[in-house]
Amino acid sequence: MRPFLCMIVMAAAVTLVPLPAAGQYPVKPIRIIVPFGPGGPSDLLARAVGQKLTEAWGQQVIIDNRPGANGIVGSELAAKSAPDGYTLVIGTNGTHGMNASLFPRLPYDAVRDFAPITRVGLAPFLLVAHPSLPVRSVKDLIRLARARPGDLTWSSGGSPSQLAAELFKKSARIDAVVVPYKGNAPAVSAVLSGEVSLVFGNIAQSAPQVRVGRLRALGVASLQRSPVVPEVPTIAESGLPGFEAGAWYGLLAPAATPRAIIERLNSEVARILRLPEVAQRLRGEAFELPADTPDQFAAVIRAELAKWTPIVRDAGIRPD
C-alpha cells in the first residue's frame, strides 16, 4: 500500500505546482487570438499592443487570426485554452455582449469563461444619412420617421450596427426597415449610393465622406462628442438621453488565469496605450483609448449583456 500511497501523494503534488508568478511572467511567447480576419479593427489593435509587449518583455507576441461565426470560433478557442497567461483574446461587444442574445447555444459564457484585462479601444458609431434625406438633425429624423412609419431604410454591416439601429428605433419609438449587408464598408456604400437612407457607420470610414458632402452627419452615438467630428452633437444630447452605441475592443484571458498575471498585463497595456506614438496612431484611426481596470472591464461586459438582450428579443432578431 505504501508505494501506492506515495504515487497518489506525488500525483497530487504535481497538480498543485503553482503557475509562474507574475514576476517571472512571461517566460515564453504569448498568443493573442483575434476572432476576426486580418486588417480589421480587432486585428489592428491586437498588433499595435502586441508589438509593444514584445519590445517591453522580450518575448514574441503572436497574433492568431481565427475568424468565423460572428467571432465565436476564436472566442471559444480562447475560452478553452490553458489559463496561464500565454493565450489571450481580443473580445468585442459583439463576442462578449451581443452574441449571448443572438445565439442561444453559444459555446462559451462571456462572463464565466474569461478573465477581463482591459479594453484597448472604443469606436462610437456616427449616424449618417444620404444628403437627399430631408433631415439635418436627430430631431428632424425622428419627426420624419414618425410621419412616415416604415418608409425609412437603415443599412447594417453586422450585429453592432444592426442592434444600434434597433436601439435607436426603440428609444425614439419609430419604425424603419433595417437592411443587412456583409460588412461595414458595404453598409456605408449603400448609403453613399442612395440605395439606403441611413447607417450607423464607423467614424473613421464615415467622417471623410461627411467632410466632402457625400454623407450628412446627424449624431455621434457616444455620451461625449467625438474629437474626430467635434461639431456633430451626440444623439444623447439631441433628444435621446443616455443613448450609446458603437464598438469596443478588449483584451481577455481564459478564466482562472492568475490574478497577478491579469494585473501585470493590465498595467503594461495601459502604459502602452499612453505611449505618444501608439496613442497618435490609434486616435488617427478614430479610436478612443480607455484605461479600464479588470473589474471595470468586467462591469462593462455585464452591462452589455443586460443591454442587448431586450433589444434582440423585441426586434425578433435571429441569426442567419
Image: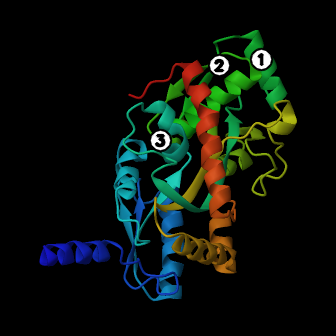
Place of residue 38 in the rendered image (x, y in percent of width and height, measured from the top left)? 40, 59
- Taking 78 as reference, is 158 left or right? right
Category of crowding for the residue at label 3, using alpha-carbon neighbours closer than 10 angstroms: few (below 14), some (14–19), many (at least 20):
few
Give the structural element (helix, strand or loop) at label 1. helix
Numbered badge on residue 183: 3
Place of residue 9 in the rendered image (x, y in percent of width and height, measured from the top left)? 26, 75
Place of residue 106 in the rendered image (x, y in percent of width and height, measured from the top left)? 39, 38
User: Dividing the picture into quarters, in which one does residue 274 lie?
Assistant: bottom right
Sequence-earlier tag: 2 or 1: 1
Query: Does the residue at mark 3 contact the one at mark 1 (Cβ under 8 Å)?
Result: no
Look at 61% across and 60% down and name the residue there: 119
Q: Nearer the viewer, residue 21 or 2?
A: 2
Q: Nearer the viewer, residue 30 or 84?
A: 84
Question: For mark 2, what is the residue?
Answer: 152
- Taking 228 as reference, is 303 left or right? left
Numbered badge on residue 144: 1
Q: CA distance from mark 2 to mark 1?
A: 9 Å
What amino acid type is highlighted by mark number 1?
A: Leu
Query: Does the residue at mark 3 contact the one at mark 2 (Cβ under 8 Å)?
Result: no
User: Dividing the picture into quarters, in which one does residue 204 lie?
Assistant: bottom right
Sequence-earlier tag: 3 or 1: 1
Category of crowding for the residue at label 2, using alpha-carbon neighbours closer than 10 angstroms: few (below 14), some (14–19), many (at least 20):
some
Category of crowding for the residue at label 1, using alpha-carbon neighbours closer than 10 angstroms: few (below 14), some (14–19), many (at least 20):
some
Query: Does the residue at mark 2 contact the one at mark 1 (Cβ under 8 Å)?
Result: yes
**Residue 144 is at least partly visible in this image:** yes
- Taking 104 as reference, is 311 left or right? right
Q: Nearer the viewer, residue 140 or 106?
A: 106
Place of residue 275 in the rendered image (x, y in percent of width and height, measured from the top left)? 67, 79
Look at 65% across and 42% down and name the residue there: 303
Q: CA distance from mark 3 to mark 2?
A: 20 Å
**Residue 285 is at least partly visible in this image:** no
